[in-house]
Image (spheres, grey):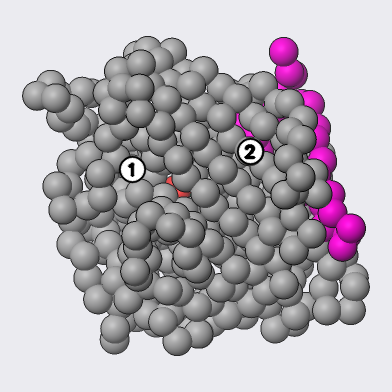
Amino acid sequence: MNKASDVFKIKNRNGVVVTFIARGGQVIGIEVPDRDGQVDDVVIGYQSVEDALAGDGYFGAICGRYANRIVEGKFDLNGETIQLDCNNDKNHLHGGVDGFNNRVWEVKPNQEKRFSESYKLALVSPDGDQKYPGELKIEVVYGLTEENEFVIEYNAVSSKDTIINLTSHAYFNLEGAGKGTVEGHELEMNASKYTPISGVIGTVTGDIADVKGTAMDFVDTKTIGEAIASDDAQVALVDGIDHNFVIDGYDGNLRLAARLNDPVSGREMEVFTDQPGIQIYTGSHFDGTETGKLGSPIVKWAGVAMETQIFPDSPNKEHFPNAVLKAGETYNHTCVYKFI
Ligand code: GAL
């Protein structure tokens, strides 16, 4: 059995180091050299493992069983209405009060040649966990390649029909965590549509809207700051971006979803996924009261989360991708964060 505070590192020969802990599989650091070889930690978080355990439990964590929001925590499955526990106003967020981010995962070294180093994380979520049906057995591989790809592979099998949407919740700041905000970061998205939200609590309306002519248009690269500074009503609702984007050309194969670039350090990150959506969240709720890396306050817009996923509230939206995992079938999801 692992302890919550057990620390693991995966490294490659280029100086990239991913550090995570057993609790939540929380990625507490990713060290990446910049264009001059200077190494910085590019995920926001705390200065110690103790602070990470006591602080925001979503930082860098594996979220589930259903990441993102389910309106009023309710959905129908096989003719039965299931009421999940609600932990985000009257909605269910990131798997509930005791989500997978809060569990101690079983971590074992993984010997796969395609990775420089890798680990396998395992968790069993009992039948009825947070009111979800079925015992769910989850395995997640964290692997790092010599091409600077941090690969996250999820698979899961349930004993009964259930719903599932796992994701990883690191907030990136490619200049270096603690060095400022991501307003100057340039973002390009392979997404000509997104799912608008209906209010400050951020639940989706069910619409699939064109990004063209809105602040959400990152089809051509622009800075995150430009979107935040716009008077777009969707931005105003959440004081930034907290939206799911619909990945163009989704066909279940790995494809480029987004590219993030920091002109100051020259670091760039590409995000690949086989999922239909990606939630972009610019961390509007950080208020500077917590101390983060480099001893700096964790301020609003200090980092951007890029969470590959099925769309929010899919179990209640028939025209959204299917989030049902049938008993005995395998859920697969790959997300790759590639540092350039
Ligand atoms: C994000 C979500 C935000 C916020 C955050 C957790 O995935 O979109 O609204 O809840 O998680 O603090």
Within the magenta stretch, is there residue 15? Answer: yes
In the visual, does 236 lie left or right of 198?
Answer: right
Q: Specify the quadrant of the image occupied by residue 131.
A: top left
Amino acid under disc 1: Arg
- The CA span between labels 1 and 2 is 25 Å
Q: Is residue 218 above or below residue 204?
A: below
Ligand 1 within 8 Å of the CB at mark 1: yes
Q: Specify the quadrant of the image occupied by residue 136.
A: top left
Provide the secondary structure element on which disc 2 rests.
strand
Query: What residue is pinned by disc 1?
Result: 69
Using the image, tell me which numbered label, if any, was put on residue 183.
none
The count of marks equals 2
Q: Is residue 195 visible?
A: yes
Using the image, tell me which numbered label, if any, was put on residue 141.
2
Say which of 30 and 150 sits in front: 150
The residue under the point 60% across, 46% down is 152
The residue under the point 41% across, 36% down is 331
Q: Residues in magenta? A: 1-26
Q: Is residue 85 visible?
A: no
Marks 1 and 2, the one that precedes in the sequence: 1
Say which of 190 and 279 sits in front: 190
Within the magenta stretch, is there residue 78? Answer: no
The quadrant of the picture occupied by the C terminus is bottom right
